[in-house]
Image (cartoon, grey):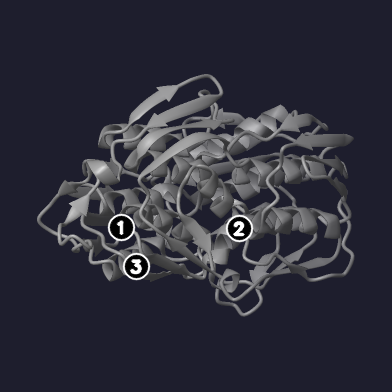
């Protein structure tokens, strides 16, 4: 599948943010581990979250799936092992969360997935689980999936690096209440992506489990039981960042519903980013309205970039930005895309851990923007981007966030073809249709 994205004159409308992928993963897992029957309203049914749902079913959890909600019959932490290898497709979140959770099932559980998932590093998590009595190891001995997990979660004390993946930390915390003895988890070194761990603690509390935080980076989890809940999944700031970004670079006004002012999601910072770049933002309790800075008839000539049909060089009047995304690595593709069509230079720092996502996003974004004539400099922990993108053909590398971020560039340059665009279904299944609803010329080929 390819997307053809043409230049947009304006944008406008009211849309609902996709349900949070992060909260959907966590809600399904906790409802599975809980005592009693939970009703999850407005879950995201995407390739990634369905991988989590299917894995929970394979471990003996009964789940009734409906269009707008699902009913999860909790196991009280007593999982089953049906003797199946769990194919987690391309969901790194599912892989990392299930690595600890599978230790609660009897026997041996094998976790695997597609070729991309088999490149996701796991050794730091495996090393941290060992002191807790969890025998989990890489089948090939290279720290990569497939991962074999033996039954047994003794508990105790362990440490984990804070600068690799917050999902490792969340993985241990989510299942810790069902360890045989209390769990003490110390996060050592620089603690990146902390907001994602805050999300984990938030939903654990909503399902009835309290985590004691000792000092700043140490968590103490006693033996407890999750309790079933009627729980509504909030909108996803990560997925909404593409709607917010599109509104910021075009003329018009967009209201995105189901985005909450008090959300624990770190990616809420996208609102501060586009405001600093020049967009107008209005915040309400449960929605946000963005008035854009650009549009086809407000484009400004610049000294670098590509000639459009009339021979002029153009960019939108967003301004370049200096921003640290250490705690919000999923925003890198969005911010890099905006920077590629903004005036001036943007410096995006604190993004080294974005190299360990579906793709090495620092490199793949640099590579694809370079194809569009963008002058940039890639370092291990940063991207420096000079605005001036032009039309062209780009690749998604199978990464959903690249598909949607590069769409933003196409709304300014026109003539953008994105190969491998079906990857958007991982987190935002109806992305092209939502963009079309807002008046954006996005066509599925």
Q: Residue furthest bottom?
A: 140
- The mark nearer the N terminus, 1 or 2, is 1
State the residue position of label 3: 368
Residue 375 in picture, x, y percent from top left: 19, 63
- For image coordinates 26% across by 52% down, the residue present is 341
Identify whether 110 is placed above or below 93: below
Q: Residues within 10 Å of mark 2 (few under 14, many from 20)?
A: many
Q: Which mark is residue 426?
A: 2
Tag shown at residue 413: 1
Q: State how far apart marks 2 and 3 are (Cα).
A: 20 Å
Category of crowding for the residue at label 3, using alpha-carbon neighbours closer than 10 angstroms: few (below 14), some (14–19), many (at least 20)? some
Residue at 15% x, 57% y is 312
Placement of the C terminus among the 4 image quadrants: bottom right
Q: Is residue 40 above or below residue 331?
A: above
Q: CA distance from mark 3 to mark 1?
A: 14 Å
Q: Is residue 288 visible?
A: yes
Horizontally, residue 182 falls left or right of residue 278, namely right
Residue 106 image position (x, y, % from top left):
86, 60
């Amino acid at each position: 599948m390819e997307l053809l994205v043409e230049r947009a004159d304006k944008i406008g409308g009211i849309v609902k943010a996709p349900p949070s992928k992060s909260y959907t993963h966590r809600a399904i897992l906790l409802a599975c581990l809980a005592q009693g029957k939970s009703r999850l309203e407005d879950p995201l049914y995407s390739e990634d979250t369905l991988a989590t749902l299917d894995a929970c079913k394979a471990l003996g959890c009964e789940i009734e799936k409906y269009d707008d909600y699902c009913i999860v019959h909790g196991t009280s932490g007593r999982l089953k092992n049906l003797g199946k290898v769990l194919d987690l497709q391309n969901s790194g979140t599912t892989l990392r969360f299930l690595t600890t959770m599978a230790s609660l099932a009897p026997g041996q559980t094998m976790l695997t997935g597609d070729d991309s998932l088999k490149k996701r590093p796991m050794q730091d998590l495996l090393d941290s689980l060992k002191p807790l009595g969890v025998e989990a190891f890489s089948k090939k001995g290279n720290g990569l999936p497939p991962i074999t997990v033996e039954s047994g979660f003794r508990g105790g004390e362990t440490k984990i690096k804070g600068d690799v993946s917050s999902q490792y930390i969340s993985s241990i915390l989510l299942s810790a209440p069902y360890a045989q003895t209390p769990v003490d988890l110390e996060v050592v070194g620089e603690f990146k992506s902390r907001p994602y761990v805050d999300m984990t603690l938030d939903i654990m509390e909503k399902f009835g489990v309290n985590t004691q935080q000792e000092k700043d980076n140490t968590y103490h989890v006693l033996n407890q039981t999750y309790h079933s809940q009627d729980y509504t999944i909030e909108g996803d700031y990560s997925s909404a960042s593409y709607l917010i970004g599109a509104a910021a670079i075009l003329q018009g006004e967009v209201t995105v519903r189901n985005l909450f002012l008090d959300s624990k999601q770190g990616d809420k910072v996208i609102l501060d980013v586009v405001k600093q770049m020049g967009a107008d933002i209005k915040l309400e309790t449960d929605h946000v309205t963005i008035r854009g800075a650009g549009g086809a008839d407000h484009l400004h000539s610049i000294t670098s970039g590509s000639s459009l049909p009339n021979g002029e060089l153009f960019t939108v009047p967003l301004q370049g930005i200096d921003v640290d995304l250490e705690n919000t690595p999923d925003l890198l593709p969005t911010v890099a895309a905006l920077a590629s069509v903004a005036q001036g230079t943007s410096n995006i720092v604190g993004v080294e851990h974005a190299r360990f996502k579906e793709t090495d996003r620092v490199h793949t974004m640099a590579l694809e923007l370079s194809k569009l004539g963008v002058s940039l400099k890639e370092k291990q922990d940063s991207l420096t981007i000079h605005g001036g993108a032009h039309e062209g053909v780009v690749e998604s590398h199978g990464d959903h966030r690249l598909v949607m971020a590069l769409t933003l560039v196409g709304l300014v340059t026109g003539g953008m073809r994105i190969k491998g665009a079906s990857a958007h279904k991982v987190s935002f299944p109806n992305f092209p249709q939502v963009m079309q609803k807002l008046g954006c010329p996005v066509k599925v080929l």
